[in-house]
Image: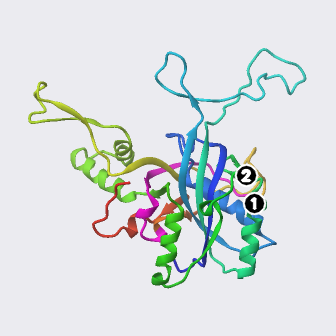
Amino acid sequence: MTDTAALLLLPRLRVQNANAIPGPLSWGFPAPSAFLGFTDAFARRLRGRFDLVLGGCGIVCHGFEPQVARPAGRRHQVLSLTRNPYYAGWKRGFSADKPAALVEEGRAHLDVSLVIEVRTDLHPDDRDELLQALPELLGGLRLAGGSLLPVPLTSLPGPRRVPKWFEWFDAAADNVATFRTLRHRLLPGFALVERTDLLAARLDELQAVQPDASALDALLDLCRLNIEPTGPDPSDAAQTLWEVRSRPGWLVPLPLGYASLSPLYAPGTVSRARDMVTPFRFCESLYGLGQWISPHRLTALEQLLWQRDTAPEAGVYRCVNHYASHLPINSNDSV
C-alpha cells in the first residue's frame, strides 16, 4: 500500500452493548461499516491536536458475547431486550397501561483489536504523546453503537494490551518483520476478511446445475448447515449415510454496505432526514461473504485492512477487503 505511512494498533477494546443486528438478513458481529465509521469519528477527535489522516481499518475479534437467553421449555434462543420507557404515555404527563412501541436492536459485548491505517507521518515525539493520550481520545466514542469500557485499574496491562505505533515503508521487504510482529500481537483472535472468490466460485457451480440460481442462493448455500446423503448407494436407505457438508473455512454472511434505491436528493428536500445540510437518498443493504481466519495466516497488509469503495454516480457505497486478490498460490484456507 503506497499511501500507508504507519499503522496504529488499538488492542483489546472492550465494547459493551454493541449492535448485533448489522443487516436485515443476519445477526451477530457488527458490519465493517461500523468500524470504518469509528475510524472517522476517531479522526475527528484528532483534529486540532494531531495532524493525521486515517485510512482503512483491520478488524480482529478476541471475544463475542451475544446478549441472548433461552426461554423455559424452548430449544431456541431469543435476544435479551429491554423497553425504556415502558409506558407509552410518559411524554404526555400521564401513565397508560400500554407498553411503548419501541423496537430495540440486539446487543453483544465485544473484545476486539483494530489496526488503523495512518496515511501521514508523525514526529517521534508526537507519536509518544498520541499513545499516551489515547485513553482520553477514545473516551466517550461509540463503536457499533456500543460503549468503550476502560481497562480495569486492578489489572496491569501486558504488552499485548498496550497501543502500538508501527512505522510502514514503501518497500515491501522492509515491512516483513513489522507485519510479523503485528500478527503476533493480534493472537489469539480471528481477523474478518472478505471472500468474494468463494462466493463467485459457488455461484458458478450452482448455475451449472440450476441456471437461474442467484448470488443470494450461493450465499445461503455457503453459510447454512447442509446435511447430505453419502454412501455406496445414496438411493438405498439402508446404505445411506448422512453427513454435514464441510466448508472451506469459517464463513459468514456479511453486510458490506448499501445500494441506492432512489436518486440523490438535495439537502432539505426530504422531510424527517437526519439533518438539512447533507444530500439524501434511500438505500438497501448489500451482502457478501466474509470469513474468520487466524491472523497468523495473513501474508499481506491488504488482506487485513477494510477500505471504503464509493461510487455515488452508480449509487454504491460499500466496504471492500482485498484478501482474495493477495492469496498466495496453493494457500490453505482453513482457520
> Circle 2 sits in a helix, a strand or a loop, which is it?
loop
Query: In this orientation, does residue 121 appear?
Result: yes
Q: Which residues are magenta?
A: 278-302
Instruction: Please tell me whether residue 122 is drawn above or below residue 133 in the rendered image.
Output: below
In this rendered view, identify the residue nearer to me: 208 or 83.
Answer: 83
In this rendered view, identify the residue nearer to me: 250 or 39.
Answer: 250
- Residue at numbered disc 1: 135
In three-dimensional space, the C-alpha distance between marks 2 and 1, rounded to whole angstroms, equals 8 Å
Query: In this orientation, does residue 258 appear?
Result: no
Horizontally, residue 62 falls left or right of residue 216, namely right
What's under tag 1, amino acid-wise? Pro
**Marker disc for residue 150:** 2
For image coordinates 85% across by 25% down, the residue present is 90
Q: Are marks 2 and 1 in contact (CB under 8 Å)?
A: yes
In the image, residue 292 lies in the stretch drawn in magenta: yes
In this rendered view, identify the residue nearer to me: 267 or 190.
Answer: 190
The colour mode here is rainbow
What's under tag 2, amino acid-wise? Pro
Compare marks 2 and 1 and give the one earlier in the sequence. Answer: 1
For image coordinates 54% across by 64% down, the residue present is 185
Q: Position of residue 168 (x, y in %)?
A: 56, 79
Q: Position of residue 225 (x, y in %)?
A: 35, 37
Q: Based on the displayed image, in which of its 4 quarters is residue 213 positioned? A: top left
In the rendered view of the protein, which quadrant contains the C terminus?
bottom left
In the image, residue 295 lies in the stretch drawn in magenta: yes
Instruction: Please tell me whether residue 58 is drawn above or below residue 175 in the rendered image.
Output: above
